Amino acid sequence: MTAVEQVLADADLKAGGPVFTTAVRFLLEDLAERIPGNTVEVRVPPLGATQCVQGPAHRRGTPPNVVEMDPKTWFDLAVGRLSIEQALAEVRVLASGVRALEFAEALPLIRGKAD
C-alpha cells in the first residue's frame, strides 16, 4: 500500500478527524492545480473552497458558477468512489451556473494503476 493509499484509508476510517480534514483540503488544492482558473467555485463547508476552471475571473459577491457539497461527498468524488452523475441524482451536490459542473472533468483526482 502506498503512502497516499494509506492516508486515504485512514481518512475513510475516521471521517471528520484531522486526517480526513487534511485529505479533503489537499484534494481541493489538487483540483485547483489541475484545472486552474476562477470560473467555478467548489465549496465544501466547513472545510474549504477553491476556484478552478479557466474563463472569466470572478472577484466579488457570489460567483456565477458554484458547486457545493459536504466533505464526505467531495472525498468520495475525488477518490472515484462516487460519480458526479450519481451525486447529482442523490442530491449530494448542489450546482448553479451553466459552467458549474466543468470541475468534474478532472475527477477522480486519485486514479488506480489501470487509469
Image (spheres, grey):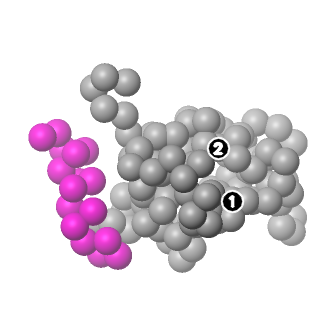
Residue indicated by mark 2: 103
Residue at 31% x, 32% y: name it. Answer: 112
Measured Cα–Cα span from mark 2 to mark 1:
9 Å
69 inside magenta stretch? no
Report the quarter where the N terminus lies: top left
Q: Position of residue 40 (x, y in %)?
A: 74, 50
Residue stretch rendered in magenta on the structure: 1-18
- Which residue is outermost to the top? 114
The answer to which of marks 2 and 1 sits earlier in the sequence is 1
Q: Is residue 59 visible?
A: no
Residue at 79% x, 59% y: name it. Answer: 96
Location of residue 92 by image quarter: bottom right
The kind of residue tagged 1 is Val
- The local crowd at label 1, few if under 14, some if 14 to 19, many if 20 or more residues have their Cα within 10 Å, is many
Q: Is residue 70 visible?
A: yes
Residue indicated by mark 1: 67
- The local crowd at label 2, few if under 14, some if 14 to 19, many if 20 or more residues have their Cα within 10 Å, is many
Q: Position of residue 104 (x, y in %)?
A: 61, 43
- Identify the main secondary structure in magenta: helix
Asked if marks 2 and 1 touch (Cβ < 8 Å), the reply is: yes
Report the quarter where the C terminus lies: top left
Classify 14 as above or below 82. Answer: below
Q: Position of residue 20 (x, y in %)?
A: 33, 66
Q: Nearer the viewer, residue 73 or 57?
A: 73
The kind of residue tagged 2 is Phe
Q: Secondary structure at mark 1?
A: strand
